[in-house]
Image (spheres, coloured by chain):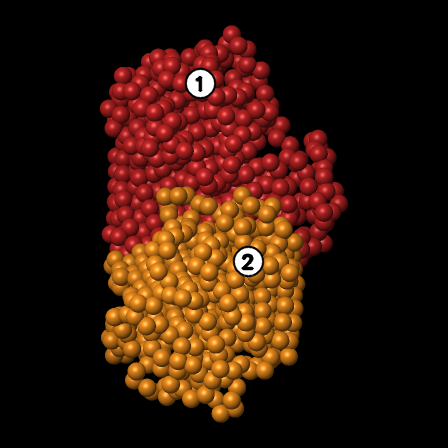
Chain colours: A red, B orange
Amino acid sequence: MEIRKDTPIDIEKDKDGILLDDVNRELYDFKDEEKDEDFYKVDEGLTPDIIREISEEKNDPEWMREFRLKSLEIYNNIEVPDWGPPIDGLDMDRIVTYVRHKSDMKSDWNEVPEDIKNAFEKLGIPQAEREALAGVGAQYDSELVYHNVREDVKADGVIYTDMESALTGEYADMVKEHFMKLVPPTDHKFAALHGAVWSGGSFVYVPKGVKVDIPLQSYFRLNARGAGQFEHTLIIVDEEADLHFIEGCSAPKYNVANLHAGCVELYVARNAHLRYSTIENWSKNMYNLNTKRALVEEGGTIEWISGSFGSHESYLYPTSVLKGDDSHAEFTGVTFAGKGQNLDTGAKMIHIGRRTSSFIDTKSICKSGGISTYRSSVVIGKNAEGAKASVNCGSLMLDSISRSDTVPAIEMRTDKADVGHEAKIGRISDEAVFYLMSRGITEAEARAMIVSGFASPVSKELPLEYAAEMNNLIKLEMEGG
Amino acid sequence: MKLNAKVNNLPVLTMNSLKLNAAPLDIDIEFKENRTLKPACLPKGITVESGVGSDELADRFKKLGIGNPKEMIVAGKYPIYNTQGFATGMGSDIDKLMKLTGTGADVYTIDSSYKSDSPILLHYVFADGDNVLDNTFIHAKEGSESTIIMYYSCDDLIADIKPGDDGKLAADKNTGLSDNLTADINDDRLGILTADKKGFSGNQTRVYLEKNAKVHLIKVQMLDKGFLFFDDIGGYSEADSSFEVTKLELGAGNVYDGLNEAQMGYRSDFRVNYGYIGLPDTVCDINYNDVFWGKKSNGVMRFNEALIGNAKKTFRGTVDFREGCKAASGDEQEDVLLFGEDIVNKTIPLILGEEEDVEGRHAATIGKLSDDMLFYMQSRGIDKRKAEELMVEASITSISSRIPSEELQARITQYIRNVFS
């Protein structure tokens, strides 16, 4: 058996003698040493004084300062969830909730500080902007360092800016009207935490009838050791409008816990369409406790495309609230849990309007002791006559030291709806590996090809560049090369 | 006595807002003195010992080697089951209830020599106001083959049946025991819906199958709507054994059902055929777990259900592959027909996997009768009501056809017709 030798890898054998390789994450794990004098940080922990300091630092309007303090109060009164991956290793008293570079946000890439620019260059963000994006936001630690949108998109009236500017600018009222209304701080402990310490993120408004042909992208990089990132993304796609938004995340690995508790709120108006794609590749010391929710009005469509590869532990269940009649939601996701990872991912669909429809298609892969849990809920409300929902989840286990669970819930409160659900768990078929090997492909490559094929429902939904990145991540996980 | 029990625990916890992690069972009842089944005679090869206390029973399980130390390793995942040496679906609180009330178990031992397709019938007859707990342990010895029907009803029609002329079994008014079920299937008293009687029937049944043993356990519950019925089953299967459970929940207004099957042995086989009709104003809470330990073990669970009016039902079904159960195969299917604007149907079918070399699948279809099917039937002169009846009858009789008793099958069919009449 051969494995690729072009990059250094650790090799171990499982009990069946199959080569398992620790993942080489050099592409994402590079560290840029932060010089203290270049960065502003609050103290570790979570106190009202720290919240006030963040609020002052960010020049919050008064209502936001009060909102943060109220959220902290809620946070202190909500218990940590007793289900899902254990988060005992996360000590909020050791997390720095706000870190920012002393430089301001730029709209010209050349003006971005050299150290930060290097980080994003290595990740290929500027190149992607040139080649395939209508606009880019780049967040480094707690604040955006770069934001730019193409002139023709601007001319159509599309607003794509950082949340801080939106909070005080022309769209301040719109932000206030929507901010944490879909995900209130009372929703769960980490939504409350987000409400208290949020920083950074993007605000997007697509006016009526405007169709943005090329995706917008925000990229989040958490570089600081022992820090948290709490960006807030608020997107409003007005009637008949169309948008594809891409979110990417990465961080270098440290030997202390980092935390990501972002929040995404998406408003999809009548007959509008929004596709929200995420390739999450946080480092494997990251607790990813993220909350994403969309509200869909009559005839609107939300599509979630989600690839979860990174993080030490994840709780991630993008939720679609199908409020309007004839609204539609789709969730397509792949999760790959490797050594030391416990990824609890899935989706929630809430059908309120009549003739609403939803479709969930997920693939979970686990390897080298990784734990992958698919968790979901589909709720059909009493008035959701004619609703249809379908759930399809597949799990692939690559060895017997890993674990894969499927925990889907369905609740129906009307007989005038139909729900179908199917889940399967299995392994890579020996016959398929043998077939590929008989054609000169190494076993490791054959297994990687099969896993890529298993995950293809997600990759085929992504723009080519991102599909290639996702396939590369799978290859990294499988081959270490 | 009072007991605030937590039963039907989901093997892994999920979001609390879904209210699926467990079901509360609050009991404040004075139970009747323990009832002991005293069959007039049993076929050769089957013996029964009555009134075996909880501690004595636990000792016997230990001596039989029942219980798996590996269970403790995953104690965080199974906070309830790990306290039971011989796990059941409703969990350890039912053990507590049996112990607190001093409910002794009837222990049936089926000798290796016993091989019969003829069913043994245990008929539990309830009068108005009966509050009764029953505890049963069935020990199927190596190579034995048996079919046991446990029938719960508020009538004693079966007790009218004459004992078989071969003298194998005699019927008893309270403990009708017969393997000669030959009632007139046209008897118009069959399947009559009554709702005037109230009571409580709590049951725990454990079945231990030694190597090559074969047991078909059939449970048919046709109590009045005023009854609370719980049925807590545990199975433990050694190599090459075959355990089949056929279950019909048809009458009681408040039902809790739990089953935990441990497929310990190589090539053990487990089947569930489950039928349920939820009438208006009724509640049903189900928790069935099939746990695979043995290599090449095979499990198939089928649930066919219908909910009417404002019936409420929660279904938890788990296929659980433990490390080492190589080449095991588990399959679970739930089909629910809905007939009511106010129904509440909750379903959570789990697959848990810590073994790579397995094949697991679960599927659920939940909804109303399809418009195409309805149109097809109406175009042939069958009205909507009749079409619904036919679909439910087809669904439930595909389960009840596993019962080797024409009379019980006829009762079930008649019951369905009465529901829709």
Residue B184 vs residue B298: left or right? left
Place of residue B64 in the rendered image (x, y in percent of width and height, measured from the top left): 64, 62
Residue drawn where x is 40% and y is 77% of the image = B174
Question: Are labels 2 and 1 assigned to the same chain?
Answer: no
Place of residue A2 in the rendered image (x, y in percent of width and height, measured from the top left): 74, 42
Mark 1: give few (<14), some (14-19) or many (20+) Cα within 10 Å. Answer: many
Q: Residue farthest to the right?
A: A1
Residue type at the position of mark 2? Asp
Give the position of the C terminus of chain A as an image quadrant: top right
Mark 2: give few (<14), some (14-19) or many (20+) Cα within 10 Å. Answer: few
Residue drawn where x is 44% and y is 83% of the image = B171
Between the residue at mark 2 and the residue at mark 1, the CA separation in whole angstroms equals 59 Å
Residue B29 vs residue A261: left or right? left
Place of residue B197 in the rendered image (x, y in percent of width and height, measured from the top left): 28, 70
| Residue linked to disc 2 | B55
Q: Is residue A60 above or below residue A257?
A: above
Residue A2: mark? none
Q: Residue farthest to the top?
A: A37
Residue B189: quadrant of the picture: bottom left
Viewer can see residue A58 = no
Residue drawn where x is 64% and y is 48% of the image = A400
| Residue linked to disc 1 | A98
Viewer can see residue A36 = yes
Residue type at the position of mark 1? Tyr
Residue A413: quadrant of the picture: bottom left
Q: Could you say whether the residue bearing mark 1 is in a helix, strand or loop?
A: loop
Q: Is residue B417 above or below residue B368?
A: below
Residue A236: quadrant of the picture: top left
Give the position of the N terminus of chain A as an image quadrant: top right
